[in-house]
Image (tube, rainbow, N blue to C red):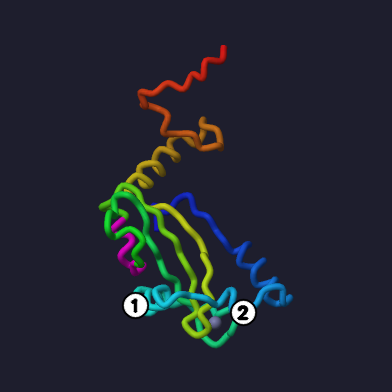
Amino acid sequence: MRTQRQIVDYSLQKRALLRDLHNGRIGTLEVCDASPYLRNAARFHGEPTEQRCPVCRRDNLTLVHYIYGDELKQSAGQARKLAELPVLAMTLREFQVFVVEVCQSCAWNHLAEQYRLGRDALHADELERGEAVNSSPSGRHRETGSSSHHREGRR
Ligand SMILES: [Zn+2]
């Protein structure tokens, strides 16, 4: 999706967790603990993948997309189908997406990634592209045009 931003990838954490699992440092029950809600969400709103479950290898993983944000009101925290996200991204200014991978066979579940979507992101992308030459890589935009002064009294 074009407006995805601030993507946080959790594959390192996942690898560490799986390593602990294979070393016997943690038990299968500790990581295969998907709640009935999560398993239902996977069944009804999940996005099938071609990726085998890293724990039981019996089933392919399903990705569940949870959405959060003030603008969502009572829909915040709900699972949505992947196809619904672009529509929301056009109507809302900003919301957070958490992608959880679930195995419907053994109940393995792990946060795969998170990112932001929304119309604001689209606008910020355009700004980023326009200012990329001059601005520092720390990505401090949004200060332009704001009426607040951050002077901190140090002179
Ligand atoms: Zn599994």
Q: Nearer the viewer, residue 151 or 48?
A: 151
With respect to residue 60, does 10 lie above or below? Answer: above
Going 29% across and 60% down the picture, which residue do you hit?
A: 75
Going 25% across and 52% down the picture, which residue do you hit?
A: 91
The spot of residue 89 in percent (x, y) is: 32, 55
Going 40% across and 58% down the picture, which residue do you hit?
A: 1
Q: Residue 138 carries which label?
A: none
Q: Residue furthest top?
A: 155
Q: Which of marks 2 and 1 is nearer the N terminus?
A: 2
Amino acid marked by disc 1: Phe
The residue that disc 1 covers is: 44
Q: Which of 135 and 112 is in front in this view?
A: 112
With respect to residue 86, does 143 lie above or below? Answer: above
Amino acid marked by disc 2: Thr
Q: How far apart are marks 2 and 1 (CA)?
A: 25 Å
The spot of residue 5 in percent (x, y) is: 45, 50
Picture quadrant where residue 21 is located:
bottom right
The secondary structure that most of the magenta stretch takes on is helix
Say which of marks 2 and 1 sits in front. Answer: 2
For residue 126, side relative to residue 50 (left or right)? left
With respect to residue 79, does 60 lie above or below? Answer: below
Is label 1 within 8 A of ligand 1 (CB to nearest ligand atom)?
A: no
Q: Is mark 1 on a helix, strand or loop?
A: helix
81 in the magenta segment = yes
Picture quadrant where residue 97 is located:
bottom left
Q: Which mark is residue 28?
A: 2
- For the record, the magenta segment spans 80-88
